[in-house]
Image: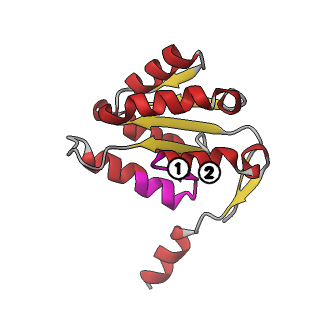
Amino acid sequence: MKEKIGKKKTIALIAHDNRKQALIEWSRTNADVLGKHILCGTGTTAKLISEGTGLQVKGFKSGPMGGDEQVGASIVDGKIDMMIFFWDPLTAQPHDPDVKALLRISVLYDIPVAMNQSTADFLLKSSLIEKEYENHEIDYYDRIRKDNF
């Protein structure tokens, strides 16, 4: 099943506590490109990016309070096209299962995901950032039906 990601993308911006400042700085550096798109993020991160950059970022709930699930549901509903998630690989998070579910949904619905600054730079500087793109979502329903018969 193929879905189109439009020229103007909805980009989720998420960061664990120890990575929030890095995401704010990255967002400030890339504000000219990010400002051409629709931005959203989990609670505190969205607020801090807005305050630190002047960009409008729609806030969901805080990650541990259900924000990760809200972002995941928006991906499932086709409302988020791309995710930048600066996560902390060295600190255990109380909502690690939620984060894993969010990453699984991102792969399942074939959206671009950056989990560090280098990958985020590559995504934002790609010529595809300003073009329509047909992602390649796998029809898992078809696969499930075949596996059950």
In the rendered image of this protein, does residue 65 appear above or below residue 9? Answer: above
Query: Within the image, what quadrant is residue 88 found in?
Result: top left
In the image, what residue type sits under mark 1? Answer: Ser
Report the span colored magenta.
103-116
The residue drawn where x is 49% and y is 53% is 106
> The C terminus lies in which quarter of the figure?
bottom left
In the rendered image of this protein, does residue 119 appear above or below residue 45? Answer: below
| C-alpha separation, residue under disc 1 versus residue under disc 2 | 6 Å
- Number of marks: 2
Q: Residues within 10 Å of mark 2 (few under 14, many from 20)?
A: few
In the image, what residue type sits under mark 2? Answer: Phe
Position of 112 with respect to 20 (left or right) is: right
Residue 5 location (% of width, % of height): 71, 49
Q: Is residue 76 visible?
A: no
**Mark 2: secondary structure:** helix
Position of 29 with respect to 95 (left or right) is: right
Query: Within the image, what quadrant is residue 133 found in?
Result: bottom right
